Amino acid sequence: MLKPRLIPVLLLKNGILVRSRTFNFHQSTGDPIGQVERFVSWKADELIYLDITRSGMYDVEKTMNVIGSTTSKKNSLSEIPDNFVDIIRCISPKCTIPLTAGGGIRSLDNISLLLKNGADKVSINTKALEEPSFIESAAKKFGSQCIVVSVDVKYDDISHQYEVYSEFGKKPTGHEPVSWCQEVEKLGAGEILLNSINRDGTGNGYDLPLIKKVAEKVSIPVIALGGVGTFAHLAEGLIKGKADAVAAANVFHFTEHSIINAKKYMKSAGIDVRI
Amino acid sequence: MFESCKVRIIDYGVGNTASVSNALSLLGVKAVITKDKKEIEKSTHLILPGVGSFGEGMTNLKKNGLDNLIKNQVLSKGKKILGICLGMQLLASKGFEYGEHDGLEIIPGKVIKIDNSISKLHLPHIGWNNVNLIGNHKITRGFEKEPIFYFVHSFHFVPENNECVAGVCDYGEKIVSILEHQNIFGVQFHPEKSHDDGFHILRNFLSI
């Protein structure tokens, strides 16, 4: 049978890895390229790289200080301002598992470039909300299997409503998550990466009611993200949240063999993971 | 190790050719990504990758005259071919994705949508699934335990003759995952993205 997937998410800001909290605070955690081989050998099932650089330009000097030691692409990197693509190109030959790249995708050409440089899938967020037909064009051109639509959701404590946000969680869109995810599916998305803004970086666990609501109402796979602080949260996302895959960022950054231990835990919780 | 292999990855605009060639590089094989007739004729091993839809795949192959070239190379010249994902499906006689389309007709069979009406499983079938190996086949030799591979697809290959089936996985119904018929091989999963077990399949193909 199909094994539920465990997916580390790596956030890149100005070309360096960061951890994030409620989409606001970002702390540097190091080299984006060196992590790949470790994650692959620890049996991560996929990798998602998201570029959360807001200005569009990189602080190249700072980037070089961090990644210069592990890559010989120093010169070419500093010559290319849009170096997320360059980072993907460095990662992909070592990434013998599926690689998703996302963040700031605005055109079919952006997608094409990422795929040509070794990404297997792309994750689209703000552009999909601004122009839903973009999902359809992307799915037609590249196939649904490589179009992941990322959906950032905020829960309002006062109104008790969920709402989809765009632009890195900054802009409310008026979309209710379930209907938006159903629309995304109809337009040809292959998967949904469902993230909770409130839970991001808190370590309090997934927003399980949100995940369950969406997973039960769409027929494409749902990847849960946002809030994992313990390995038990990963198991909850699958068992209680009914997600097809569980993703997390921060929890994997600071511990050696994090993926191996996470999978051991999941196995002991009765989940048939790939080990 | 594979010095005598001349691998050509067929470039017809819908494949993840970079990933396949990256994987072969890790095995020490420099593959050429090409749609050039002369290049393809030089090959010992052909790889037909592919993501996307059946109809579009066939249209793109035909546009470049690659359909007849592949058939000639494989059926008359006996070249070894490995179809990956859509590339395996295109070996069939017919595909039923967005209408009915003729395939390459190299392995008799049809490509139809996975039936999830009873299982209610999500489609596409995305992720790692173990494959139950069947019979003695060259493409699957040397596995010590049941291998596990990365799949991403909504349609599957139903061959007319089950003798060519070398592996199946379970996703609500039995999904043909590995095909072998003489010099013709196909895998529904992505060996180039299936870590050790995927690389094992690629090594087997290159050793044949």
Image (cartoon, coloured by chain):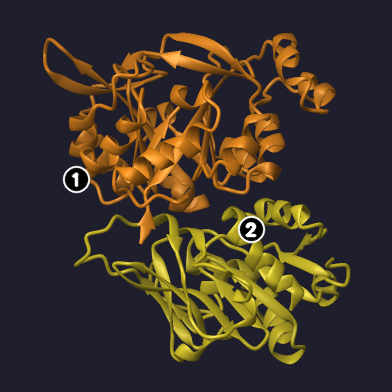
Chain colours: A orange, B yellow
In the drawing, what numbered circle is on residue B184?
Answer: none
Front-most of residues A245 and B116: A245
A191 w.r.t. B52: above or below:
above
Q: Residue at x 54, y 17 (%)?
A: A18
Question: Disc 2 or disc 1, which is closer to the eye?
Answer: 1
Q: Residue flagged by tag 2: what amino acid is it? A: Gly
Q: Give the letter of the chain under mark 1.
A: A
Furthest toward the right, the residue is: B3
Secondary structure of residue under mark 1: helix
Residue A85 image point, x, y percent: 66, 32
Is B46 in front, or is B163?
A: B163
Image position, residue B196 (x, y; %) = 62, 56
Amino acid at pointer 1: Glu
Residue B22 picture location, percent across and down: 72, 51
According to the picture, the residue beneath numbered tag 1 turns out to be A216
Towards the viewer: A267 or A241: A267
> Is residue B53 rendered to the left or right of residue A186?
right
The quarter of the image holding the N terminus of chain A is bottom left
Dividing the picture into quadrants, the one containing residue A75 is: top right
Can residue B94 be seen from the camera position used here? yes
Q: Chain of mark 2?
A: B
Neighbour tally class for label 2: few under 14, some 14-19, many 20 plus, Cα within 10 Å: some
Measure how far apart labels 2 and 1 are at the Cα level. Answer: 35 Å
Task: Say which residue appears at 48% left-offset and 81% top-offset.
Answer: B134
Q: Is residue B68 above or below residue A75?
A: below
Q: Observer-nearest residue: A185 or B145?
A: B145
Against B163, residue B174 (above or below) is above
Circle 1 residues within 10 Å: few <14, some 14–19, many ≥20: some
Classify A229 as above or below B146.
above
For disc 2, the marked residue is B13
- In the image, A52: left or right of B15? left
Determine whether the residue tagged by mark 2 lies in a helix, strand or loop.
loop
